[in-house]
Image (cartoon, rainbow, N blue to C red):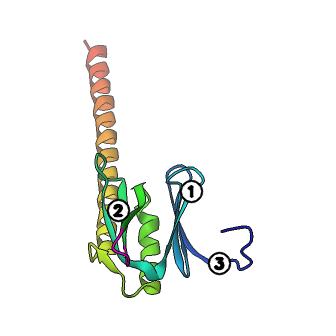
């Protein structure tokens, strides 16, 4: 916002990701900050026609959010977004403010939920394997010590 703006806009939601990067949702616009230093990308909500969310190119967990505007241009709102949970929480409010906006994929909220569940399941699997490996090494060590003391 400019210093000469007298009307303070109401912030509806914020998705923070990365160092100083965030997507802010206001009642009339979507603001992406942190792409470049001291640069804000402001998109009026009535200009949004489609939001596209896709996996990032060497790291699929870092999402890319693109917006198709009514002037047939496409802009990148977020590159390397890692806060899928925060964006998933903002998505219903955004679609409520822009009911005519298309989502690509159409079930974006559901796909984000599945991605978060997969991430959680993978983390639990990794932690479980590490704990089992440590327990196996401890049991093997105890077995070697027990056999060594009796011979």
Judge whether 4 appears above or below 130 on screen.
Answer: below
Disc sitting over residue 9 in the figure: 3
Dominant secondary-structure state across the stretch colored magenta: loop
Disc sitting over residue 116 in the figure: 2
Disc sitting over residue 39 in the figure: 1
Image marks 1 and 2: residues in contact by CB distance under 8 Å: no
The one of 83 and 116 positioned closer to us in this rendering? 83
Q: Position of residue 91 (x, y in %)?
A: 42, 75
Image marks 1 and 3: residues in contact by CB distance under 8 Å: no
Give the SS element for disc 2: helix
| Mark 1 vs 2, N-terminal side | 1
Q: Position of residue 18 (x, y in %)?
A: 49, 51
Task: Give the residues drawn in magenta, as a range.
Answer: 69-73
Instruction: Work out how far the residue at label 3 is from the one at label 2, CA to CA, in angstroms.
Output: 31 Å
Q: Is residue 90 left or right of residue 73?
A: right
Instruction: Work out how far the residue at label 1 is from the one at label 3, CA to CA, in angstroms.
Output: 18 Å
| Mark 1 vs 3, N-terminal side | 3
* Disc 3 versus disc 2: nearer the observer: 3
Name the residue: 74% across, 78% down. 6
| Mark 3 vs 2, N-terminal side | 3
Dot 2 crowding, Cα within 10 Å, few <14, some 14–19, many 20+: some
Image marks 3 and 2: residues in contact by CB distance under 8 Å: no
Q: Is residue 15 left or right of residue 139?
A: right
């Amino acid at each position: 916002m400019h210093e000469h703006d007298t009307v303070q806009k109401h912030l509806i939601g914020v998705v923070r990701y990365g160092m100083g990067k965030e997507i802010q949702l206001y009642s009339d616009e979507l603001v992406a900050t942190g792409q470049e230093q001291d640069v804000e990308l402001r998109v009026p909500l009535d200009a949004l026609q489609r939001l596209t969310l896709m996996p990032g190119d060497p790291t699929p967990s870092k999402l890319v959010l693109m917006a198709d505007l009514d002037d047939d241009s496409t802009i990148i709102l977020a590159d390397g977004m890692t806060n899928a949970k925060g964006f998933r929480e903002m998505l219903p409010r955004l679609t409520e403010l822009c009911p005519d906006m298309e989502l690509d994929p159409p079930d974006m909220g559901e796909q984000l939920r599945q991605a978060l569940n997969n991430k959680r399941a993978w983390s639990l699997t990794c932690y479980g394997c590490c704990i089992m490996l440590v327990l196996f090494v401890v049991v093997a060590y105890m077995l070697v010590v027990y056999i060594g003391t009796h011979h």
